Image (cartoon, grey):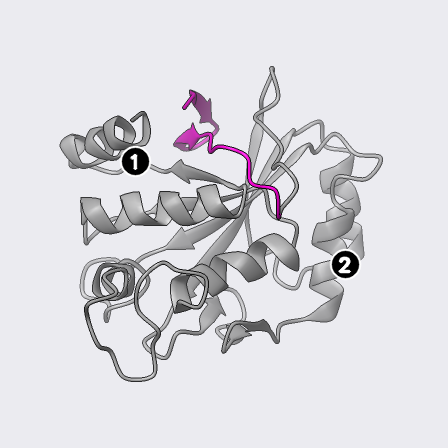
Amino acid sequence: MKVLLLSIYLVSFSLFCSAQKTYPAAAPLPAKNLTMFGRGLYPGDDATYQLLKKSEFTTVLLSSFYIHADGDLYSGDSHQPIIHNGKWIGDAAYVKRVRDLKKKSSVKRIEILLEGRWYGQPPNTFDFIRDWYDPAKTVGGIITGTGEQSTLYNICKVLKEVLNADAFCIDDESVYDTPSIIAMGKIAEKLNMHMTLCPFRINAYWKDILAASDK
């Protein structure tokens, strides 16, 4: 599994996953990569997305999205759910803007940033990934594990199928649970996506994920 480094205001490792027949291959990092960290782009507007297409950036990292206790994925911009019960319920115009982003454009790759809680915030995203990835656990309203019926799998599946995202990015600044993130990498593999890392403190945590991903 190849590991590539990309950076612009962040450092992110790209973990390349083996091909699956069900889904088309996700875009690799361009040979010369320049990444735009895109906060405030949901739902955005056509003019802004046209600027991105002409920007000469090759990767757009769409930020930020949070998993809630009920299994929904929320936009950090609108504070409203975009995925509910494994289905897209978000803004339709946003879907069109994101899916058009790589057409006649400098942009070759789209990533979705999964962000976690900061100090003092209530549990979200990586707390729940830690609590849900083990299929032996029982959580009300959640299908635990990482199988095709699981809550976590279906969140990622919607990002792949609806937004045509090439990767999801792990921006964990609080939980640092290695086994659960390695399990998320396995979901990426099944969906023929990439999983990238946005390292913040606790160097051993990120190194352990990379080491496991190379096996």
Q: Earlier in the sequence, mark 1 or mark 2?
A: 2
Residue identified by numbered label 2? 96
Lateral position of residue 204 relative to residue 87, left or right:
left
Lateral position of residue 12 relative to residue 204, left or right:
right
Quadrant hosting residue 12: top left
Residue 172 can be seen in this image: no
Quadrant hosting residue 205: top left
In the image, residue 2 lies in the stretch drawn in magenta: yes
In the image, residue 131 lies in the stretch drawn in magenta: no
Magenta range is 1-22
Residue 6 lies, in percent from the top left, at: 47, 25
Seen at 52% across and 72% down, the residue is 86
Seen at 49% across and 57% down, the residue is 156
Residue 196 can be seen in this image: yes
Lateral position of residue 5 relative to residue 211, left or right:
right
In what quadrant of the picture does the N terminus appear? Answer: top left
Q: Is residue 127 above or below residue 114?
A: below
Marks 1/2: CA distance? 30 Å
In the displayed image of the protein, which residue is found farthest to the top? Answer: 31
Q: Is residue 40 above or below residue 37?
A: below
Lateral position of residue 152 relative to residue 134, left or right:
right
Residue identified by numbered label 1? 199
Residue 179 lies, in percent from the top left, at: 20, 47
Seen at 66% across and 60% down, the residue is 162
